[in-house]
Amino acid sequence: MREWVVKRRERTKQLIELGGLVVKAGLVELTHDDRATLYGAFLAVAVKLRGEDRKHALVRWQRKGKRAFEAEQEASRHQRPARGSTDVE
Protein backbone atom coordinates (compact mmCIF):
# COMPACT_ATOMS: atom_id res chain seq x y z
CA MET A 1 0.00 0.00 0.00
CA ARG A 2 1.26 3.46 -0.80
CA GLU A 3 2.72 5.50 2.02
CA TRP A 4 0.32 8.43 1.52
CA VAL A 5 -2.65 6.06 1.82
CA VAL A 6 -1.32 4.63 5.08
CA LYS A 7 -0.72 8.13 6.46
CA ARG A 8 -4.19 9.26 5.41
CA ARG A 9 -5.79 6.27 7.14
CA GLU A 10 -3.77 6.88 10.30
CA ARG A 11 -4.86 10.54 10.29
CA THR A 12 -8.50 9.58 9.69
CA LYS A 13 -8.35 7.11 12.60
CA GLN A 14 -6.84 9.79 14.85
CA LEU A 15 -9.56 12.30 13.95
CA ILE A 16 -12.32 9.76 14.55
CA GLU A 17 -10.86 8.84 17.94
CA LEU A 18 -10.55 12.51 18.95
CA GLY A 19 -14.13 13.15 17.88
CA GLY A 20 -15.16 10.15 19.94
CA LEU A 21 -13.56 11.72 23.00
CA VAL A 22 -15.57 14.90 22.45
CA VAL A 23 -18.75 12.82 22.39
CA LYS A 24 -17.65 10.62 25.30
CA ALA A 25 -17.03 13.70 27.47
CA GLY A 26 -20.58 14.83 26.79
CA LEU A 27 -19.47 18.04 25.11
CA VAL A 28 -21.63 17.62 22.02
CA GLU A 29 -24.76 17.24 24.10
CA LEU A 30 -23.81 19.95 26.60
CA THR A 31 -23.17 22.50 23.84
CA HIS A 32 -26.10 21.40 21.68
CA ASP A 33 -23.54 20.50 19.01
CA ASP A 34 -22.51 24.14 18.64
CA ARG A 35 -19.19 23.97 16.81
CA ALA A 36 -18.24 27.56 17.65
CA THR A 37 -18.69 26.85 21.36
CA LEU A 38 -16.65 23.66 21.14
CA TYR A 39 -13.90 25.42 19.21
CA GLY A 40 -13.87 28.25 21.73
CA ALA A 41 -13.54 25.77 24.57
CA PHE A 42 -10.64 24.05 22.83
CA LEU A 43 -8.97 27.42 22.28
CA ALA A 44 -9.33 28.14 26.02
CA VAL A 45 -7.65 24.81 26.79
CA ALA A 46 -4.83 25.67 24.36
CA VAL A 47 -4.31 29.04 26.10
CA LYS A 48 -4.09 27.24 29.45
CA LEU A 49 -1.53 24.82 28.02
CA ARG A 50 0.60 27.70 26.73
CA GLY A 51 0.58 29.35 30.14
CA GLU A 52 2.53 28.98 33.35
CA ASP A 53 0.07 26.40 34.69
CA ARG A 54 0.78 23.96 31.83
CA LYS A 55 2.42 21.17 33.85
CA HIS A 56 -0.14 21.31 36.63
CA ALA A 57 -3.06 21.30 34.16
CA LEU A 58 -1.63 18.37 32.20
CA VAL A 59 -1.11 16.30 35.34
CA ARG A 60 -4.58 17.14 36.68
CA TRP A 61 -6.35 16.42 33.37
CA GLN A 62 -4.37 13.23 32.76
CA ARG A 63 -5.29 11.85 36.19
CA LYS A 64 -8.93 12.75 35.68
CA GLY A 65 -8.98 11.12 32.24
CA LYS A 66 -7.28 7.94 33.45
CA ARG A 67 -9.76 7.64 36.33
CA ALA A 68 -12.67 8.13 33.92
CA PHE A 69 -11.34 5.47 31.52
CA GLU A 70 -10.81 3.06 34.43
CA ALA A 71 -14.29 3.71 35.83
CA GLU A 72 -15.78 3.12 32.38
CA GLN A 73 -13.90 -0.17 32.01
CA GLU A 74 -15.01 -1.27 35.46
CA ALA A 75 -18.63 -0.41 34.71
CA SER A 76 -18.53 -2.31 31.41
CA ARG A 77 -17.11 -5.38 33.19
CA HIS A 78 -20.08 -5.40 35.56
CA GLN A 79 -22.59 -5.04 32.73
CA ARG A 80 -21.37 -8.06 30.76
CA PRO A 81 -22.72 -11.49 31.70
CA ALA A 82 -20.09 -13.82 33.13
CA ARG A 83 -18.63 -16.42 30.77
CA GLY A 84 -20.67 -19.55 30.60
CA SER A 85 -23.69 -17.96 32.20
CA THR A 86 -26.99 -17.56 30.45
CA ASP A 87 -29.85 -15.14 30.85
CA VAL A 88 -32.33 -18.01 30.79
CA GLU A 89 -33.60 -19.19 34.15
Image: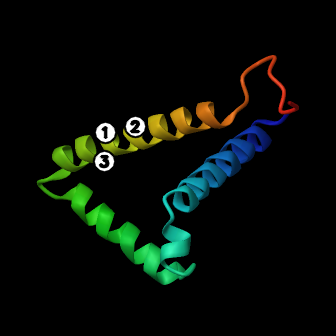
Q: Quadrant of the C terminus?
A: top right
Label 1: which residue? 63
Q: Quadrant of residue 83?
A: top right
User: Is residue 13 positioned above or below 44 on the image?
Assistant: above
- Marks 1 and 2, how far apart in space? 5 Å
- Marks 3 and 1, how far apart in space? 5 Å
Residue 30 image position (x, y, % from top left): 48, 75
Q: Are marks 1 and 2 in contact (CB under 8 Å)?
A: yes
Label 2, residues with CA under 10 Å away: few <14, some 14-19, many ≥20: few
User: Is residue 87 positioned above or below 23 on the image?
Assistant: above
Q: What amino acid is found at the position of numbered circle 3 in the picture? A: Trp
- Marks 2 and 3, how far apart in space? 9 Å
Residue 1 image position (x, y, % from top left): 86, 33
Tell me which residue sits at (65%, 48%) in the image. Answer: 11
Q: What amino acid is found at the position of numbered circle 1 in the picture? A: Arg
Q: Quadrant of residue 23?
A: bottom right
- Specify whether 44 is left or right of 14: left
Label 2: which residue? 66
Q: What amino acid is found at the position of numbered circle 2 in the picture? A: Lys
- Specify whether 8 is left or right of 19: right
- Specify whether 52 is left or right of 37: left
Label 3: which residue? 61
* Relative depth, front residue between 84 and 88: 88
User: What colour scheme has been applied to the protein in the rendered image?
Assistant: rainbow
- For marks 2 and 3, the one nearer the N-term is 3
Tell me which residue sits at (79%, 43%) in the image. Answer: 5
Q: Are marks 3 and 1 in contact (CB under 8 Å)?
A: yes
